[in-house]
């Protein structure tokens, strides 16, 4: 019966065989057992499909949808149509999750009858296995303490966008006819913002339980670097989101936080544009949907002098000036010890010691930090040794 499935987990899969087993293992071993796992094979040409079929024989909660390569948006929508769970969740096939994640999300959802429940995120470095928390811990702690809230009460939510760090009540998704944009990357911007704005009850778990893999070559960010046109997908997602907020007559209410999210992202999307032609296309596309009120608010953000200069160039359409300024800044670096300038198209770097800098004081501070870190490490080792002795005592 449909009501026996608490969460439908939708996994778009496209050529991620290298990471797929770890992803699926983290799903089938969830402490919440009443789930279904819908793997949408989006035209994979590696052995991803064979891996999914292998796990279908192991766990009957897994089902497969196979389609031609239509992109992650179409894959997510295909999963939504097939889903029978009380709630919907999305996990990217190169990511993985804590084994308690969906049980904790579902428990919180039932406690408050939430339309949307959010969880914290770890960024996971594929190269070295290290991970670190993502987003503002203080904001998450505040939301968690409130129990249940709305986006209207906390517009800052629009600065924290992602489709896979949440579960969504399926009836809520169906009632509002929510679907994921298709045929583009950055399809995961509009959907969660629509859910935020339309949800009557949102709750949050102040604990990072989702591991978002970096440097795998399969994430949106990795794919965008390889294909410049995907940067325009990001701007399209921003434009579609603005149009939605205007249609809902809430744009002014969310405008500041929406623009804050947007301009924080802009620098990343522009810094690796290969040439002026693509830079101009990006700037022209961005400028076409900003209005006077957007500029007035954006000028208030404390992002530094270079940001203010950038906004002035953008508003006046001075794309060449903005492009040259960006390229020069990419060659210039400054820290507490040096001013560095890299010669264009080379790895040659000129280093100049900063004036009026107390190098002896700098060394003393570095030695003090090293000493304190060593003390902390020693204390931690003592604590762990005591815990091991305590555990051994109780086992005996």
Image (cartoon, rainbow, N blue to C red):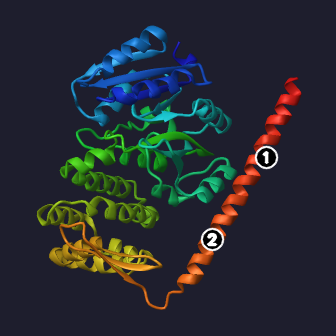
Q: Residues within 10 Å of mark 2 (few under 14, many from 20)?
A: few
Q: Compared to 137, does 348 lie above or below?
A: below
Q: Nearer the viewer, residue 351 or 170?
A: 351
Q: Position of residue 192 (x, y in %)?
A: 43, 45
Which quadrant of the structure image shows residue 74?
Answer: top left
Q: Residue at the spot x=38%, y=78% of the render?
A: 299
Task: Name the mark nearer the viewer: 1 or 2.
Answer: 2
Q: Residue at the spot x=30%, y=80% of the render?
A: 309
Q: Position of residue 231 (x, y in %)?
A: 24, 54
Q: Position of residue 341 (x, y in %)?
A: 29, 77
Q: Quadrant of the C terminus?
A: top right
Q: Which residue is mark 1?
A: 383
Compared across the picture, whether 308 is left or right of 282 comes to right
Q: Position of residue 142 (x, y in %)?
A: 65, 56
Q: Is residue 19 visible?
A: yes
Q: Compared to 206, does 292 lie above or below?
A: below
Q: Nearer the viewer, residue 280 or 375?
A: 375
Residue 15 - label? none
- Which residue is farthest left? 277
Q: Is residue 199 visible?
A: no
Q: Compared to 300, does 225 lie above or below?
A: above
N-term-proximal mark, 1 vs 2: 2
Q: Residue at the spot x=39%, y=21% of the render?
A: 82
Compared across the picture, whether 33 is left or right of 68 comes to right
Q: Residues within 10 Å of mark 1 (few under 14, many from 20)?
A: few
Q: Secondary structure at mark 1?
A: helix
Which quadrant of the structure image shows residue 315?
Answer: bottom left
Q: Which residue is mark 2?
A: 367
- Which residue is farthest bottom? 356
Q: Nearer the viewer, residue 356 or 72?
A: 356
Which quadrant of the structure image shows residue 305?
Answer: bottom left
């Amino acid at each position: 019966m449909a009501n026996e499935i608490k969460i439908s987990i939708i996994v778009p899969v496209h050529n991620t065989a290298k990471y797929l087993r770890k992803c699926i293992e983290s799903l089938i071993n969830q402490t919440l057992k009443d789930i279904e796992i819908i793997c949408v094979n989006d035209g994979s040409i590696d052995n991803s499909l064979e891996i999914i079929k292998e796990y279908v024989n192991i766990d009957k909660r897994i089902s497969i949808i196979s389609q031609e390569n239509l992109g992650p948006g179409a894959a997510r929508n295909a999963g939504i149509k097939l889903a029978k769970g009380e709630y919907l969740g999305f996990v990217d096939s190169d990511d993985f999750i804590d084994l308690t994640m969906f049980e904790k999300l579902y428990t919180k959802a039932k406690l408050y009858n939430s339309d949307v429940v959010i969880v914290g995120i770890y960024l996971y470095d594929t190269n070295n296995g290290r991970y670190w928390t993502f987003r503002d811990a203080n904001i998450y702690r505040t939301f968690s303490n409130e129990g249940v809230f709305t986006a209207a009460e906390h517009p800052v939510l629009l600065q924290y966008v992602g489709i896979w760090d949440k579960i969504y009540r399926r009836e809520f998704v169906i009632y509002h006819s929510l679907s994921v944009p298709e045929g583009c990357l950055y399809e995961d911007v509009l959907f969660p913002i629509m859910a935020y704005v339309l949800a009557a009850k949102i709750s949050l778990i102040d604990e990072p339980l989702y591991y978002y893999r970096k440097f795998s070559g399969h994430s949106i960010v990795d794919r965008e670097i390889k294909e410049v046109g995907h940067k325009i997908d990001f701007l399209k997602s921003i434009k579609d989101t603005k149009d939605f907020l205007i249609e809902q007559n809430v744009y002014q209410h969310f405008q500041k936080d929406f623009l804050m999210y947007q301009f924080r992202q802009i620098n990343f999307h522009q810094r690796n544009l290969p040439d002026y032609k693509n830079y101009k296309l990006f700037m022209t596309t961005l400028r076409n949907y900003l209005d006077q009120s957007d500029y007035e608010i954006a000028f208030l953000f404390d992002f530094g002098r270079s940001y203010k200069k950038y906004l002035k160039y953008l508003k006046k359409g001075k794309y060449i000036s903005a492009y040259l300024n960006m390229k020069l800044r990419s060659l210039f670096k400054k820290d507490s010890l040096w001013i560095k300038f890299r010669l264009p198209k080379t790895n040659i770097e000129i280093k100049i010691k900063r004036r009026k800098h107390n190098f002896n004081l700098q060394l003393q501070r570095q030695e003090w930090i090293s000493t304190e870190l060593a003390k902390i490490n020693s204390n931690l080792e003592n604590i762990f040794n005591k815990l091991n002795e305590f555990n051994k005592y109780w086992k005996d």
